[in-house]
């Protein structure tokens, strides 16, 4: 297995280098120095600012510096005195505090819903569950956020007479900070994603329930519970793992809407702020970390295949 992991890492090195190269080229299509100084700047100001930002070096030298540690020790252009490493370490925990619980909750609820719908396939319970899933996935993310903030924060706090959920002012020093700042975003994320996941998992489980080995298990007299848990759900876990592992990087890096609306200083909102402010060190460092996360997640998915299904051989 380790040989397979090493080979996959070696194969992905050119891909990773290409991603970083494309990002650096895209950021330099327009001269960032003039963009920061404006049209009325003098040539002396331009040269001094270019040197201060580290853009006076050759492109290859800047590219090599990015490869040597993701530029984590470079200072942000906008947040003076803050390095990329400090910004990343500060932003990663708020994102994980939402992404991790949201992924676990969504997967558990979606799997349970899919199992109930597949077990009662073609019956009223199946139709109602799938109709609810379609309605849930048809509603916009922004609508979930607005309704969640209004009823889950404003109205609930008004009825209870105290602040249960906070919309802004993220502060980890509070005793119940996770419940106050993260629980509502987690519930909103789960409400949005459950519909998509439940329909996908149901289709996978229904397909597995019609295979020959399941009919054989029933013919041997095994109980329905044992058939569904051991022969259906276990074989469906390959698709479940694929979906979860593919979702994970997007969930960590893509919490842009939820982080902006709830004032959470996570990776998504920090990256968007850096892009709008043309803060190259932050953009390049975060992109390098995100690309590495995608590659590691893909390799981990293949490894989990072999763990879940002994028939899978990593070669």
Image (cartoon, rainbow, N blue to C red):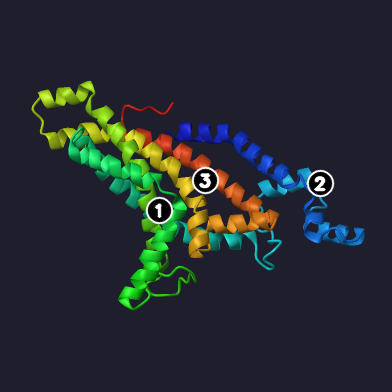
Q: Nearer the viewer, mark 3 or mark 1?
A: 1
> Which residue corresponds to the image point at 44% horizontal and 46% vertical from the top-left?
248
- Residue 315 in sight here: yes
Please give the label number shown on residue 293: 3
Residue holding disc 2: 58
Q: Secondary structure at mark 2?
A: loop
Name the mark nearer the viewer: 2 or 1: 1
Q: Is residue 69 visible?
A: no
Q: Residue at x 54, y 56 (%)?
A: 267
Q: From the top left corner, tell me how far across and down residue 212 is, in percent.
A: 21, 21
Secondary structure of residue under mark 1:
helix
Query: What is the CA distance from the residue labelled 2 to the residue labelled 1?
Result: 44 Å
> Which quadrant would residue 275 be assigned to in this image?
bottom right
- Give yes or no for contact between labels 2 and 1 (Cβ–Cβ under 8 Å): no
Position above or below: 252 against 235: below
Give the CA separation, mark 3 to mark 1: 21 Å
In the rendered structure, the answer to whether residue 114 lies left or right of residue 219 reads right
Residue 55 horizontal/vertical position (percent) = 79, 53
Q: Is residue 265 above or below residue 256?
A: below
- The quadrant in which the C terminus is found is top left
Q: Which mark is residue 189?
A: 1
Q: Is residue 285 left or right of residue 31?
A: left
Q: Residue at the right extreme? A: 43
Q: Residue furthest bottom?
A: 161
Q: Give the residue drawn at x 39%, y 42%.
A: 244
């Amino acid at each position: 297995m380790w040989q397979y992991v090493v080979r996959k890492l070696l194969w992905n090195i050119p891909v990773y280098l290409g991603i970083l190269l494309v990002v650096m080229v895209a950021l330099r299509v327009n001269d960032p120095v003039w963009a920061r100084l404006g049209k009325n700047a003098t040539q002396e100001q331009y040269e001094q600012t270019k040197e201060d930002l580290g853009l006076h070096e050759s492109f290859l030298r800047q590219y090599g510096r990015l490869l040597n540690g993701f530029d984590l020790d470079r200072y942000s252009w906008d947040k003076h005195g803050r390095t990329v490493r400090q910004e990343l370490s500060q932003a990663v925990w708020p994102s994980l505090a939402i992404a991790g619980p949201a992924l676990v909750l969504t997967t558990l609820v979606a799997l349970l819903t899919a199992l109930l719908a597949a077990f009662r396939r073609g019956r009223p319970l199946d139709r109602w569950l799938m109709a609810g899933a379609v309605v849930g996935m048809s509603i916009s993310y922004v609508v979930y956020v607005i309704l969640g903030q209004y009823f889950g924060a404003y109205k609930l706090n008004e009825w209870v007479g105290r602040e249960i959920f906070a919309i802004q002012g993220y502060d980890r020093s509070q005793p119940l900070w996770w419940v106050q700042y993260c629980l509502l975003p987690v519930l909103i994320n789960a409400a949005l994603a459950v519909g998509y996941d439940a329909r996908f998992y149901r289709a996978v489980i229904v397909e597995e329930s019609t295979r020959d080995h399941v009919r054989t298990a029933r013919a041997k007299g095994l109980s329905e519970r044992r058939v569904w848990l051991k022969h259906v759900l276990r074989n469906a876990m390959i698709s479940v793992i694929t979906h979860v592992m593919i979702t994970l990087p997007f969930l960590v890096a893509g919490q842009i809407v939820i982080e902006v609306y709830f004032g959470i200083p996570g990776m998504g909102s920090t990256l968007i702020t850096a892009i709008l402010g043309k803060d190259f060190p932050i953009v390049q460092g975060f992109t390098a970390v995100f690309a590495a996360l995608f590659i590691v997640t893909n390799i981990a998915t293949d490894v989990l295949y072999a763990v879940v299904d002994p028939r899978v051989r990593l070669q």
